[in-house]
Each structure stands twice: as C-alpha cells, then as structure tokens.
Amino acid sequence: MLLGVVRRARGYRGGSRPIRSNVLAGRTVANLFYEPSTRTLVSFQLAARNLGAEVVNVSVASSSVVKGESLVDTIRTFDSLGLDALVMRHSEAGAPYLAARHFSGSILNAGDGLHAHPTQALLDILTLSDRFTDLSGLTVAMVGDILHSRVARSTAVALLTLGAAVRLCAPPTLLPEQGWLTLLRGGRPGTVSQTSSLAEALNGADAVMALRMQRERQAGGLLPDVKEYIREYGLSAERLSTLAPGAVLMHPGPVNEGVELHSDTITAPFSLIGEQVTNGVLVRMAVLELLLRGANG
Ligand code: NCD
C-alpha cells in the first residue's frame, strides 16, 4: 500500500507541474485546519484542484468554531452539506478518528496533535525513494524535537515498515521514554534506536531529517536554552560531513533557520527540502484519488 501510493504519486509527475486530470470532477473536498499550516494546506488545495475537485477552505477563525461549536457538531454539519472528503488538521491526537465516526465521506489526517502526519510520511518516502533505489538498506537520522514531532512518528513508522534503520536524536529532555521504541517498531522489519549524541546519529547515515523545535508544544523547562541547542545539535555543513557519501538532508518545514539548520545547509546541493514540498502535492493527489475513487479507479 505504502509503495502503491508512492507509485501512483509518481504517475502524476509532469514537467515543471503535476499532470492534471478531471477524475474528481463533481467531488467536493473541504480543508478544515484548526492549526496553522502553509505547505500542507496549500498542497492539499492544489492536489484536489489538480484532480478537478471543488475545494472549500474552512478558516477556523471565521467559522462557527469560534462560537464554541464542538468538533462533532462541525463534522455533522459538513456531513449534511454533502462533502466528499474532509482534510483535517487538529491539535488533539485522535481528532480525525473521532470525526470519521460522524462523517460519511473520507477523512484525511493532515496532522493530529503529537500523533501522526501520514501524508508527510508518504512524501518523505517518495522523496527518499527518488534518490535511493532500496530503502531497506538505508540509515536515516532524525534530529530535533522528537518528543513533540508527529512527523518523526509517522515517517519513522513508514521507514521501519520498509526495513530501514532509524536513529532518533535529541537532547535527553526531548526524547520519549525508551519503551516507546518497542511500540514504534511494533514488529516491523526495520530497526530503531535513540541517542543524545549527534555525532553518533550522523556518523555514516544516508539521510538526515531535521525536525523543528516545537516551542508551541513544549512545556516550560524542556529546552532551557536555544543557544545551547544550536551549539550541540544545530546542523551545519561541517557537521554533516560525517554522513555517508551521497547522503541527503531533509526537513518537513517550517524551518527555524539558524536553530535546527544553519542557513548554509538549507539550499545546499544535498538538500531535498524543495523536492519534499513538490512531492507533497503528488502524494496528496494519489491519496485523494485512492480514497475518492478506490484502488481500481
Ligand atoms: C509539520 C507539522 O505540522 O507537523 N509541518 C508540516 O506539516 N510540513 C512539522 C512542524 O510543524 O514542525
């Protein structure tokens, strides 16, 4: 399934823009974002439009949510309006699952709390598999705020499913408890470890995925000093020189320039950050088509 979506996403790759079609003509997709977003929101909008769907954007700030409408009530309203799909981002883990119980169309999770960000994982896998033919031999280091990152969770699960080795790296206060690794691995073929030593995480890795410091989610005291973080974990071109030859750099965005990534790395030739954004539209097209037309569509 994972690689099936990736293949379908590749099929939409045109020259400078994705190939458009009308397979979702007459369908309506609503984007309901309770948390800020730039690339995820815009790429879902473009993806639905590229397939010929009608797109409705619900700005939470101007909707009845500010009048205290409950999530379930909002979802029921969308259901009565006859929408086909609801793309949803919410600060509470599990919100899309609750929504799915009250909506007869498809719900797409565009990020729920600390839990998951499935289309980010898919675009990360597409981006990596454009560069590396076999992800099962790959070692990927994720560096940053692992504890608060739904991207780390989703992308790590995808990589483990494909047999890759995942190294999670953060200051001790931003790493989950060790027992979490067993849950994350969950019998998948890959391997996962965590460390607070950046040198250990980077040494010989094929890819490094930097993660944003999620200051809005951090309870006070988890990161005493940003300067200290930059000194110990900030990724500079020099630090990345210990990666394997041909290694790549990724970041889901938004980047805190000068914190998790030095500016010399963001646009370096080994950075795939731009490709990740471009691929986001392709995987979201694939997911929308699969959900709204079915696997044989
Ligand atoms: C991420 C998210 O919102 O989970 N961004 C994204 O979707 N591209 C990561 C983040 O906010 O740091």
Image: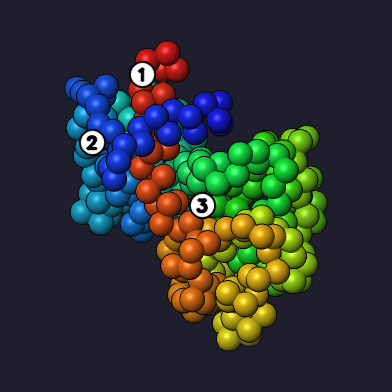
Choose mark 2 or mark 3, whichever is in front.
2
Identity, as a three-letter code, of the amino acid under mark 2:
Arg
What residue is rendered at 63% in x and 70% in y? Answer: 240
What is the spatial separation of the Cα atoms under label 3 and label 1, in whole angstroms? 28 Å
Please name the residue that numbered disc 3 is placed on.
Answer: 113
Circle 1 crowding by C-alpha within 10 Å: few under 14, some 14–19, many from 20: few
How far across and how far down the image is residue 264, in percent? 49, 76
How far across and how far down the image is residue 76, in percent? 32, 31
Q: Is residue 163 above or below residue 265?
A: above
How far across and how far down the image is residue 58, in percent? 25, 46
Identity, as a three-letter code, of the amino acid under mark 3:
Gly
Please name the residue that numbered disc 1 is placed on.
Answer: 293
Mark nearer the N terminus (3 vs 1): 3
Choose mark 3 or mark 1, whichever is in front.
1
- Secondary element at image label 1: helix
Q: Is residue 295 above or below residue 99?
A: above
Mark nearer the N terminus (2 vs 3): 2
Question: Who is closer to the viewer here, 245 or 286?
Answer: 245
Q: Which mark is residue 49?
A: 2
Q: Which mark is residue 69?
A: none
Q: Is residue 149 above or below residue 118?
A: below
> Hey, which quadrant is residue 229 in on the image?
bottom right
Identity, as a three-letter code, of the amino acid under mark 1:
Arg
Circle 2 crowding by C-alpha within 10 Å: few under 14, some 14–19, many from 20: many
- Indicate if the residue with disc 3 has its beta carbon within 8 Å of ligand 1: no
251 left or right of 52 in image: right
What is the spatial separation of the Cα atoms under label 2 and label 3, in whole angstroms? 27 Å
Q: Quadrant of the N terminus?
A: top right
Q: Is residue 108 visible?
A: no
What is the spatial separation of the Cα atoms under label 2 and label 1, in whole angstroms? 15 Å
What residue is rendered at 65% in x and 38% in y? Answer: 134
